[in-house]
Amino acid sequence: MGEIKTYTISIFTENHVGLLNRITIIFTKRRLNIESLNTSESEIKGIHRFTIVVNVSEETVIKLVKQIEKQIEVVRAFYHIDEETVFQEIALYKVHTNTIVNGIKVESLIRDNHARILAIENDFIIIEKTGRKEETNDLLKKLEPYGIMEFVRSGRVSVTKPLEHMGSLLKIK
Amino acid sequence: MGAPSTLESTKTNTSIELSGAEAVIKSLIHEDVDLLFGYPGGAIMPVYDALYNYQNELKHILTRHEQGAIHAAQGYARASGKAGVVIATSGPGATNLITGIADAQIDSTPLVCITGQVISQLLGTDGFQETDVIGISMPVTKWNYQVTSAEEIPEAIAKAFYIARSGRPGPVLIDITKDAQFAQLNFDYKKCESIRSYEPIPTTDQNSLKKAAELVNNSKKPFMIFGQGVILSGAEKELNQVVEKTGIPAASTVLGLSALPTTHPQYVGMVGMHGNYGPNLLTNECDVLIAVGMRFDDRVTGDLKRYCKQAKIIHIEVDPSEINKNVRCDIPLLGDAKEVLQSLLPLVNSNTHPDWIDEFEKCEKIEFEKIVQKEFFPKSDQISMGEVLNKINNITKGDSIVVTDVGQHQMISCRYAQYNYSRSSITSGGLGTMGFCLPAAIGAKLAQPLRQVIAIVGDGGFQMTLQELGTIKQFGIDIKIIILNNEFLGMVRQWQELFFEKRYAHTEMQNPDFIAISKGYGLESKKVSKRDELNNALEEMLSFDGSYLLEVKVGKEDNVFPMVATGASVSEVRLE
């Protein structure tokens, strides 16, 4: 089956109700877990973009992309390994306000990890960190001793490195 | 979101104002539909009401169950090459279509299904007969769409027909809320000719064509397997030309049957689990395999690790996702089978392969001695399924359309029935849907009223959709129904015998009096259990003017061979 790797699948679609379901069915039918999923508009007017991360073999990701492209309202789908893309995720951490008031350590943690404070309330503060999963995980571990009230991480957003514009590959008439 | 974007263009001077329901009917007529199958109910009543005014243009066949309607539409589509059309109501009406939709999806049958839906304000409230048919049908439709305003109807239906028919055909479903059926719109119909995100026929790579021809020209033992793709693209003539010019032996998949006449000298039979001995065995002997419009189903390939590893594989296919899906392919030839075969024809050399064909003939002889002979001329008193098929062939000479259900009788029919014309074998291949036969035969007969339609069905499958005898009677549809009754779910029993130590768990059936049932529906019928009555009974049935049901009692524990058991290689095809 080949080596299991992390692949980012970028899907360009019409913006229609139900298409998300049509795409996820392709994964669930094959018992494949989606690591992360993000949808947004793309640079092309009226064209929506899905970014899906999966850990599979190249043979499997090729089959997935073909099945995705087979959907009527999918314009094109591409897959890339991490080295071929620039990608980020955003993580939010909610911690007690007193951890920052009482401890200098947390403040330096935020600085050293290139995170920032998004909001300060009487009882809690929200820290934001953008980066790769390992980086946001790393900060999560470091903050854990101080007590984390809530943690959330977004799906991956990714753009490809080659200069060629993805839009030019879409062949939209 | 999702509203078709060109609504402005429909508001031209030629447009007329009518209800959404009438727009459905007018749209169907614009798509050259003259026959549809269906079953009314609350949420589709406006469409049925509109249908009342168009009875001359649009014939509606009222089946006895929505499953009957959809299988009939499948039979119609398979026999005619047109899209089958079904209408049903919301909730149970819609869910009863699902089996047929799944069957059509896996067997690439063009269908347009129109379901009624609760009024749009009730969507998501668990209203009476509300079901999320869009969600339920999503994995088994080529495309589906929910219409919530009347203005969307013409464009949605135009898209539905275009998608169902083009490229690799398949079922589509349009769900229309009841308020959209009642509302008025300015109707102007424009056929859909393209969708920007959809490429139905991929372009064929010219270089690959040359390479493929070169492989074929240098091959000593080329072998062709053709599937339904040939029939769907109307490539029967081109298939014949390539086969005859190259001298290649050609075998069919279950769904490819009748694309090449069974009497063709280079036709070597059927591949697959219960296919013929030679084509299965010699798949692992050929040096080049040309697969035309087929998808290497597991019932065709057996163990993939030991399937055709020695050969170069050329795959002619319209659906790019089928390339390298199950079997690695050396030269993919993407495109419409007809066009690809046309392009290939001038590139291949005239050739013959007498020694190689001889190997198939040797296998055929072995199969005849070990299996066919015993089935056609059994020593036991009990009638065998094979002998019924043999006698049918002797009478029809291969001119009939044979529709089957699923199980032992299906495999026997596919093995032995003769076909002179394309679109003469209609069977549920990929999904293996019991209950398919009787309604599908209705559709086939309505599609081809001048041809004889023989429905061959087991006692199990017949009882899944026998209510359609009512439809046959009401519309005077002439079908010759043969129940091959072994009082068992025969194929499951065969597996229990071979792989489950004869533990016959829930496969024996106490059957009703099929003749009494037939009489109850007002149909002619006869029961035969003795060999010397069989031929006359078949002749009487096949020459009868109108529908006729013949029950034939066959051996209870007969098995179908050859067989490539699950997990076995095609080289391990068993003769007993």
Image (tube, coloured by chain):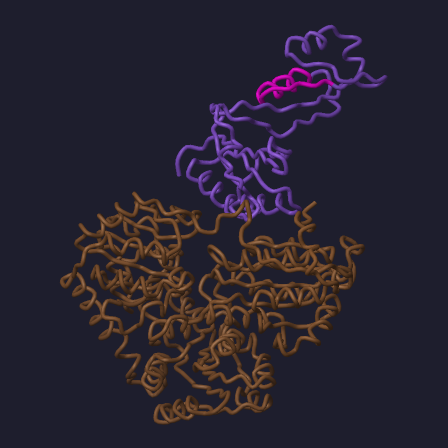
Chain colours: A purple, B brown
Measured from the top left, where is residue B416 in percent x and y? 33, 75
Measured from the top left, where is residue A122 in percent x and y? 86, 17
Front-most of residues B210 and B252: B210
Front-most of residues A153 and A70: A70
Give the left or right position of residue B469, taking residue B187 as reference: left
Q: Which residues are magenta?
A: A127-143
Query: Is residue B63 among the parts visible in the rendering?
Result: no
Q: Residue at x 62, y 70 (%)?
A: B66
Give the left or right position of residue B404, taking residue B473 as reference: left
Where's the C terminus of chain B, which quadrant? bottom left
A111 lies above or below B57: above
Q: Residue at x 40, y 47 (%)?
A: B203
In the rendered image, the residue lying farthest to the left is B355
Quadrant position of residue A100:
top right
Residue A30: in magenta span? no
Q: Residue at x 30, y 52 (%)?
A: B307
Front-most of residues A156 and B40: B40
Residue A135: in magenta span? yes
